[in-house]
Image (cartoon, rainbow, N blue to C red):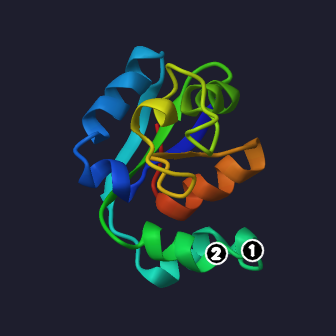
């Protein structure tokens, strides 16, 4: 099973991208595709369109377009649920010890990593960041 993950701009800026990617590999994820991205505000708004009516939409899209990030397609058995567990709670103050967000996130918004939450979401998100790419 495949899913999408993004090492967010805060983690890239803090020099934590390599540690996060290494952690994914150590947990049995295999990289299928990987690219450094710099989202425009419009691209961030398209990606997070499902949250358009939420109060945090503007600050989220500002943050996601604030600097380089790394988008990756990863696979392993139960990829979506395994990645969600490894990421930890969105709010790092509630994230379990040993999770990526407990280790690297600064706040509920600057939370180091994104991961798809369902197979349909993963399909959309993979297509969003890797359009026209024939993934092995």
Where is 2 relative to 64, above or below?
Answer: above
- Give the SS element for disc 2: helix
Question: Up-down: is 28 above or below 104?
Answer: above
Q: Residue 21 lies in what quarter of the image?
A: top left
Task: Report the quarter where the N terminus lies.
Answer: top right
Measure the C-alpha gap from mark 1 to mark 2.
Answer: 6 Å
Say which mark, if any, is on residue 57. Answer: 2
Q: Name the residue located 46 percent from the left edge and 37 percent from the top edge.
A: 136
Residues 134 and 7: in front is: 7
* Residue closer to the observer: 41 or 101: 101
Q: Residues within 10 Å of mark 1 (few under 14, many from 20)?
A: few
**Location of residue 57 in the rendering, given as x and y in whole percent from the top left corner:** 64, 75
For label 1, the residue is 54
Q: In the image, residue 127 lies at what x, y percent?
A: 57, 59
Q: Quadrant of residue 53?
A: bottom right
Residue 132 in view, yes or no: no
Q: In the displayed image of the protein, which residue is found farthest to the front?
A: 93
Mark 1 and mark 2 in contact? Answer it, CB < 8 Å.
yes
Q: Is residue 130 above or below residue 83?
A: below
Task: Residue at 50%, 36% (x, y): give it.
Answer: 101
Q: Residues within 10 Å of mark 2 (few under 14, many from 20)?
A: some
Residue 17 visible from this viewpoint: yes
């Amino acid at each position: 099973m495949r899913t999408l993950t993004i090492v967010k701009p805060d983690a890239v800026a803090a020099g934590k991208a390599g540690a996060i990617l290494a952690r994914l590999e150590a947990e049995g994820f295999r990289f299928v595709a990987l690219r450094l991205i710099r989202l425009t505000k419009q691209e961030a708004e398209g990606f997070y369109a499902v949250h358009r009516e939420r109060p945090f939409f503007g600050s989220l899209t500002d943050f996601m377009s604030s600097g380089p990030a790394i988008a990756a397609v990863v696979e392993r058995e139960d990829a979506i649920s395994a990645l969600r567990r490894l990421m930890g709670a969105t709010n790092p103050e509630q994230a379990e010890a040993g999770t990526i967000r407990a280790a690297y996130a600064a706040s509920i918004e600057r939370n180091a990593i994104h991961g798809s939450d369902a197979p349909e979401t993963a399909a959309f998100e993979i297509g969003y960041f890797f359009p026209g790419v024939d993934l092995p």
